[in-house]
Image (cartoon, rainbow, N blue to C red):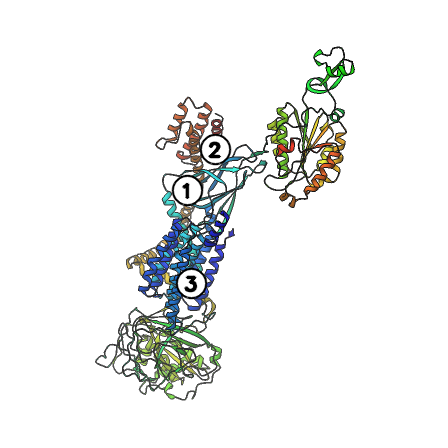
Amino acid sequence: MTSASSLRDRMLRGSGTPEDSVAMRVFVAGAVEVAILAVVAQGGVHGAAAILPLTLAPVGYVFSYRQRHRSNITTKVLLSVGLLVAFAAFLQSVQVAGSVDQARVPLASLFLWVQVLHAFDVPRRRDLAFSMVSSVILMAEAGALSLSSSFALFVLPWAALSGGWLFLSSRPRSAPATKVVAVRRRTPTRGETAATVRGAAWAGSSVVLASLLVFMGIPRLPGTLVRSLPFSLGGAASAVADFAGGVQNPSLPAETGDGVVNFAPDAYPGFSDVVDLRARGHLSDEIAFRVRAPQAALWRAEAFDTFDGTMWTISNRSTEPLQQGDAPNAVVVPDGLGLIGPVPTVRVTQTFYIDTPQPNVLFAAAVPEEVYFPSGGLQVDLYGSVRSPILLDEGMVYSVVSNVPVTDARTLRLTHPPGPIVSDPIYVQIPAEMPERVGELAHRITAGATSEYDRVVAVQSWIRRNTTYDLDVPDDPAGVDSVDHFLFVTRTGFCEQIASSLAIMLRTLGIPTRLVTGYGPGERNPLTGYFEVKQSDAHAWVEVFYPGIGWVPYDPTFGVPEAAPHASSRFIGGEVLAAVGRFLSGAIPGSVKSLFRDAGSGMGIVRDGMLRAWPVVLVVLAILVLLVRARLRRRSRAPAQAAALGAYLDLTEVLAPLGHPLVEHATPREYLRGVSADPAIERAVAFEAELVVATLERDRFSGRPAPDADLDRARAAVTTVREIVSRR
Amino acid sequence: MRLRKRAAGLVLGAGILFLLGTNVQAGWLFVLCALMLGTLLSGAILPGRMLRGIEVERRAPAEVVQGEEAFVDLIVTNRARGIRLGLTVDDPHVAPTSLYLTKVSPGERVELVTLRPARKRGVQEATVVTLRSAAPFGVAERRRTLTVAGSTIVLPAVLPLGPLPFLATASDPNRSARSIAHRGSGPEYLGVREYRPGDSPRHVHWPSTARTGTVMVRELEEERSQRLAIVVDTLTDVGDEGSPLDACCTAAASIARVALAGGHTLRMIAVHPGRGVDVADDVDEGSLRRRLAAIVPDGVPLADVVDKGGDAFRDVDVVVLIFPTWRTNRDGALARAIESLAATRTRVVAVPVEVGPDDAKRMAAMKAEEVDAFVTTLVRSGADVFPWRHDAPLDVALAGDQAVPR
């Protein structure tokens, strides 16, 4: 009967003993709650749908703790029914989902419910481990959705709770076979809490440090191991009035009296029909959008082909609609807008998450091939710029698959020499009134260059060497050619001026160019992995046409990110350190920083003085080394001090049954007097006790640790006392 | 360092997160992946720190009887400055023991009083205690061995026995014929003879006198103690607890107690590795049990000990040979040795201890039917055989009821 009932128990409850540790369950339940909260906070499930799981999960853990020793067959049946209901609800939800992405929320909800239902039946340690694994999955889902560093608010407590669970669950499962009759602890009265905190801090900091090192060493592969699915999520978008393929940028300020549209903090005037080199102003550091991409790129928006001395314009405003692609929800950009030759390319999938409203032009790495966008009706112009009938409002998500050309010097040098290389002469157009010295300068710079590529590089290098980037340059005088004024008067300016100088100088050499606007790559957030592109990253650069290849980007201001990054760039150690540096730089007040600067200059003076008085420095250093060494030696002797104290404590323990327990307020000498005065204590015992106390006093008060020989003698004395007492 | 299962779990989880992170280019997945691997790394290093500064002391009794429990104290002291977590202390002394301490604070001294069953006879001199820790994350386990002094002799158990037939003065004719009859005024009756001058009238045996017409007197054996030699077969052994050799030692100690209680003197003959045959005369019970506790397998067949014992068997009245039923004892050498010994008018008592079926599987031990044939052979060699079957109590085996008649 007994074996039958135990078999029944095993069948119902499975093998293994129930877990009785309340602390372990609290850690697991806490980790699961944090994970559910993280999913909710990242929009994995809708807020209202998450309230019930958040409430029920802790109830489930309490319930399963109370029921842990029972078979719970009724509960198991009910939970099975609950699982079926949750699965049915999931199937119903995904029926109306139009894409895999739209099934994400129902899937997360299903997983949450599985987690909650499982919480009602976790009797054993292994079941709790399953709960922890589930919490990892929830955290991973939330992490995949997270766009910001604030996700750390969930990761840190979850990691701490998981660490607690790891510690508690590493204890032996069953009681030892050996009978432990008694456990006597003699704990120092002070410092236990501090030691516990120190231990936890030590473990935590070692995990953080090791994780940081691993994090810096994890390669960021281009994501082609498993092809990622581009997706698009539509929000409430503003429609573009009378959309016919043109660019609309509602955030731009009104024109000034002389017809110039200046910069606004949240609107770059280059995203329009013109790029006016007379415009001035600053853009904000607010994040414009975040890009999930395997590598950095210039996020291209528009291209301009005509320059009149102050403004770039688009000569051909015609656009054509994008056609439906093979993949669902994908539209295809026509070929030939960027590359025309058989150039190696890297397929880069990018997903843009719009943070602040942008114009109706899609940003993408050159050359876009497929676009996944929440609205239809996309148009593309002859320069490869894609426009949408809706504005890119906050919260919009779209994806673009681009073929980024990989070119090198050898390939580009093999192209044809300059000449009538492109059918449209607009790309070599220069303003009629432009002074000839611009062309003369270009020819002088490229005097020794033998190929188009060498000429481009020579001019770009000259610009980089001889001009300075500055956003606060004064307005150009009226009537001057902006490029001429920049090259021969100021040589200081912003990216539009620098890029225009390159484009126009190359045109004077007969090399086709065009000015491109968009955003710089931004900075990759090491935690989220997203490139965070700020409004102030709005940028202008140049595209140069190479016969047989197509348009190749050049950025004389900051440089173009590599199309095929070197393997070392797959590790973000440098980016992590840079991010830490930026964080510290932002966190440290300016006054402190100036203090450090002053200290740095002061250190220079001190260093000079030390070099002059080097003998004194050597002596001081030697003294310091000796002091540190002595200190380290004293520290290394700490166990010896503990040994003297340990011998004394052992003595008091042995004599306690004889009426001489350890009295905290009595000094060792007073304790010894009490022992010696006791007529019931043998003289031999008193003699040995004297030895122990004397060793302790010498160890404590002589200023130097007791010698090892004395400590050994004290230990032997305790052993002798123990033997004498045991013979009584 | 020994990695635990959860280390594989962390690596697997980190790998999956890495693949997912690479697929969806989500940095937080790399953070979670790094956290797992960071936990793995620090979890592999920190246990080593948990073992530093820990001292272990052991207090154990000098002697304990096999089968009984012994108090063994382990005193664990943390001499380090930091807290020590998740310590497991493995102490093989007397009985393999694992004790777990959740934490030991700096300077703390934890005294663990354990009660350990002394299942294995012999001198327990475990000088090493193993400290283990997988704290704080249970990812990998580190070990450190500490030298801890301590010696405990596990004495063989003594089972209660009734009177032993081979210790009583034999009255049967065969026994009288073979042994030296020490005639005297003891309580044992040897026979009747004609009256001789000086015989006490109290000893006149009237029925015989009437039957023969000659005055006949009872002849009584002189009352004196016997010299008993105990030899234990130390050829080999098998098993950790209650092994065949342990059973032999228990039988020897039990027989010795009865013999000593009857006023007999004991000689212990044993083979010690490197020292040859060791003869100890007039041993008391404590000394004999300590000697039995020290016996270890030496590879010398019992037949060799009997054959080459020489002087060890001189002046001995009864030789008790106690041996497991190893198959090697069946090869005839032991029977011949017993025959030779019996020819010296020494009474030979053989106590074959049947090796249990579990042990028999591991060693070349006789099967039950082979034991029966073996016993018969021994009887023919001139020994009084008291086989101790593995499922029978010792007192029954030695009571004589089970003895095989010659």
Of residue B246 and residue A333, the one placed in the foreground of this image is B246
Per the image, the residue denoted by label 2 is A715
Judge depth for marks 2 and 3 and give the one in front. Answer: 3
- Quarter assignment of residue B30: bottom left
The Cα atoms of the two marked residues, 2 and 3, are separated by 54 Å
Label 2 marks a residue whose chain is: A
Label 3 marks a residue whose chain is: B
Q: Report the amino acid beneath label 2.
A: Arg
Q: Report the amino acid beneath label 3.
A: Phe
Counting residues from the N terminus, which is met first, the one under dot 1 or under dot 3?
A: 3
- Quarter assignment of residue A642: top left
Q: Which mark is residue B251?
A: none
- In this view, the residue farthest toward the front is B211
Pointers 2 and 1 in contact (C-beta within 8 Å): no
Pointers 1 and 3 in contact (C-beta within 8 Å): no
Instruction: Give SS at disc 3.
Output: helix
Query: Do marks 2 and 1 share a subunit?
Result: no
Label 1 marks a residue whose chain is: B
Residue pictured at 62% horizontal, 44% vertical:
B358
Quarter of the C terminus of chain B within the rendering: top right
Query: Do marks 1 and 3 share a subunit?
Result: yes
Q: Which mark is residue B30?
A: 3
Instruction: Give SS at disc 1.
Output: loop
Per the image, the residue denoted by label 1 is B106
Q: Residue A637: tell me if it is visible.
A: no
